Amino acid sequence: MNINKHYLELQESYLFSTINHKVAEFQREHPDRKLIRMGIGDVTLPLAPAVVAAMQAAVAQMGCKSTFHGYGPEQGYGFLREAIAVYYQRFGVTLPADDIFVSDGAKSDLGNILDLFDADNTVLIPDPVYPVYVDTNVMAGRKIVFADANEENGFLPMPDRSVHADIIYLCSPNNPTGAAYSRGQLEAWVDYALSEDAVILFDAAYEAFICDEDLPHSIYEIEAAKRCAIEFCSFSKTAGFTGTRCGYTVVPSELVAQEIGLRKLWLRRQTTKFNGVPYIVQRGAEAVLSEAGQRQCRANIAVYQENARIIADTLRGMGIWFTGGKNSPYIWLKCPGGLDSWTFFDRLLAEAGVIGTPGSGFGKNGEGFFRLTGFGEKAATEVAMKRFQNLFA
Ligand code: PLP
């Protein structure tokens, strides 16, 4: 038996374990200090009442012989795929429910989709980046080229015509930088992908945080994108489903490579390797998209958006360069005083009792930057930013 040696090429991810280790040590030495966690990438507010009610009703159905559900359709129940198709209409995007695949979250599908592509493809990945894109391709032994995101391009890299790519990852609004692509910028990426015969894997996990009216929520707002893009989305950050697990992937029937429709391949892959998302969870997800569910989920998102605004306003007032904070729960700031990411982490922890995430953990271009998130509580966010201000003013 031979193992997949590419697993040995994976870089150990020390980011969150090092953070936890440093925080635990600090807390041991200073048991009375109250720390404020602003590094978390997880939601903190509970599921919306409409979602809970729908899931409770679904549990009751599962306990009754006449309404019990066994294996569901691998692609997801029609009721949820139809509701997602209706949701897309608000962005002016028409999608047949057949092109929508319900998943147990964006992370799984972002990795699983690679089943459709030969190992011999060149992958273009922005740096800094959500680490899953890099690691899943390293596991398959694919060649990776990086697109530099930096202060000059506002952490929104654009296509370089001198670089060839077969598979392109875009994440907008972005984790970790919070930056979001404009329509014109996405058009340029779609043009580039079509000219390279490449596929764009578009991660829209944070689309629900977009509040600027002219920013696209979906890559399919660019008409030609149906010929070159797969979109991944999730109820995790939209509706607090990080522990409940539900998302969706769109593979348009117009997307064809070497005369083969990718939708058909993906359906084959899913029916072979995936047995669907629990009925109870899909009923909960359907409720997210109901009128009451939208109102309640939007209210939760507004709490995170308000926290992000507080952080952004403080940084703006201090003249600190940053991206995000609007259209995203993330704020990506340039470490004051030219500090490197870990030195800044240490100072913020020791002197302000605030925990964030060093940007260097997301790629080489993250060095000298730092991620804060709006997923905490408002009062704690305000206290944290006061301390931040006192420390670096
Ligand atoms: N994509 C991005 C950019 C993320 O930041 C995350 C989670 O943090 C995911 C995908 C994963 O989402 P899910 O919970 O749906 O797997």
Image: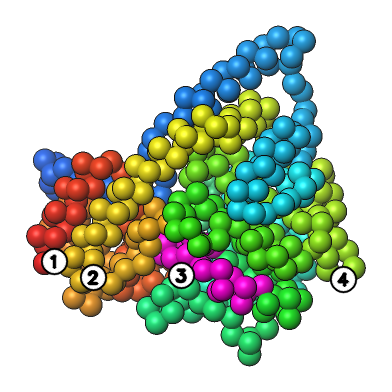
Residue drawn at point x = 64 percent, y = 61 percent: 221
Write the start and end of the magenta stretch as one range. Answer: 171-190
User: How far apart are the two marked residues, 4 and 2, measured between alpha carbons?
Assistant: 48 Å
Q: Which of disc 2 and disc 3 is earlier in sequence?
A: 3
Q: Are the residues tagged 1 and 3 within 8 Å (C-beta)?
A: no
The amino acid type of the residue labelled 2 equals: Ile
Of circles 3 and 4, the one toward us is 4
User: How far apart are the two marked residues, 3 and 4, measured between alpha carbons?
Assistant: 32 Å
Q: Which of disc 2 and disc 1 is earlier in sequence?
A: 2
Q: Are the residues tagged 1 and 2 within 8 Å (C-beta)?
A: yes
Q: Residue 67 placed where, x, y %?
A: 74, 14
Task: Please name whichever residue, 301 or 247, is drawn nearer the observer in this view of the structure.
Answer: 301
Task: Please name whichever residue, 308 or 290, is drawn nearer the observer in this view of the structure.
Answer: 290
Q: Which of disc 2 and disc 4 is earlier in sequence?
A: 4
Q: Which of disc 3 and disc 1 is earlier in sequence?
A: 3
The answer to which quarter of the image holds residue 246 is top right
Q: Which residue is mark 3?
A: 128
Q: How many marks?
A: 4
Task: Please name whichever residue, 137 or 103, is drawn nearer the observer in this view of the structure.
Answer: 103
User: How far apart are the two marked residues, 1 and 3, measured between alpha carbons?
Assistant: 25 Å
Q: Which residue is mark 1?
A: 392
How would you rate the neighbour count of disc 1 (Cα within 10 Å): few for under 14, some for 14-19, many for 20 or more?
few
User: How far apart are the two marked residues, 3 and 2, measured between alpha carbons?
Assistant: 19 Å
Of circles 4 and 2, the one toward us is 2
Which mark identifies residue 258?
Answer: 4
Q: Which residue is mark 2?
A: 320
Of circles 3 and 2, the one toward us is 2
Which secondary structure lies at badge 2? loop
Which mark identifies residue 72?
Answer: none
Q: Which of disc 4 and disc 3 is earlier in sequence?
A: 3
Mark 3 CB near ligand 1 (8 Å cut): no
Residue drawn at point x = 66 percent, y = 72 percent: 190
